[in-house]
Amino acid sequence: MNVKTLKVQCPSCDGTGLYVGLSEVPGTAVVCIDCEGTGNQIMKFTPFTKRKEKPKITEVYLSAGAYIGTYTGAIGNAISYEDFKEGKMPH
C-alpha cells in the first residue's frame, strides 16, 4: 500500500491545542488529548487510484441511511453490480 501522511488541524480543538467541554469551569481549558496540545494531527491515508472490486456482490441498492450508527437497510430497485461498475446508480 502507498500510505501517505498529511498534517491537519486538530478537529477536536480547532487547532488551539486546548479543549473546553462541559466539565471545564468558565475561563479554563484542558490540554487536548487528541493532539496532545500541538493543535495538529497526522492523518494517514491511501491516495485513491481506482474503485476496487467487491467480490460476491451481484446486486446494488441505495442505502436507507443510518440511525445512531446502525445501518437501516436497502431501498428502491436494485441494479446489477456490472451496471454499477459501469457508472449507473440504483434508484
Image (cartoon, helix red, strand yellow):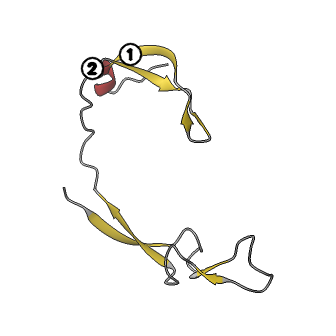
Query: Does residue 70 sit above or below 78 in this rendering?
Result: below
Residue found 42% across the figure and 24% down from its top: 89
Residue named by callout 2: 82
Q: Is residue 7 left or right of residue 49?
A: right
Residue 83 in the figure: left or right of residue 75 = left
Q: Which residue is farthest right? A: 26
Question: Residue at left 52%, top 24%?
Answer: 73
For image coordinates 49% across by 77% down, the residue present is 35
Percent of width and height locating residue 59: 35, 17
Q: Residues within 10 Å of mark 1 (few under 14, many from 20)?
A: some
> Label 2 vs label 1: CA separation?
8 Å
Q: Quadrant of residue 69?
A: top right
Seen in the picture, residue 56 relative to 53 is either above or below; the reply is above
Q: Quadrant of the N terminus?
A: bottom left
Decide: is 42 above or below 1: below
Callout 2 crowding tier (Cα within 10 Å): few <14, some 14–19, many ≥20: few
Residue 47 placed where, x, y %?
28, 55
Query: Which amino acid is tagged 2?
Result: Glu
The residue furthest left is 1
Return the residue at label 1.
79
Q: Amino acid at mark 1?
A: Ile
- Secondary structure at badge 2 equals helix
Give the camera-side residue of 91 and 11.
11
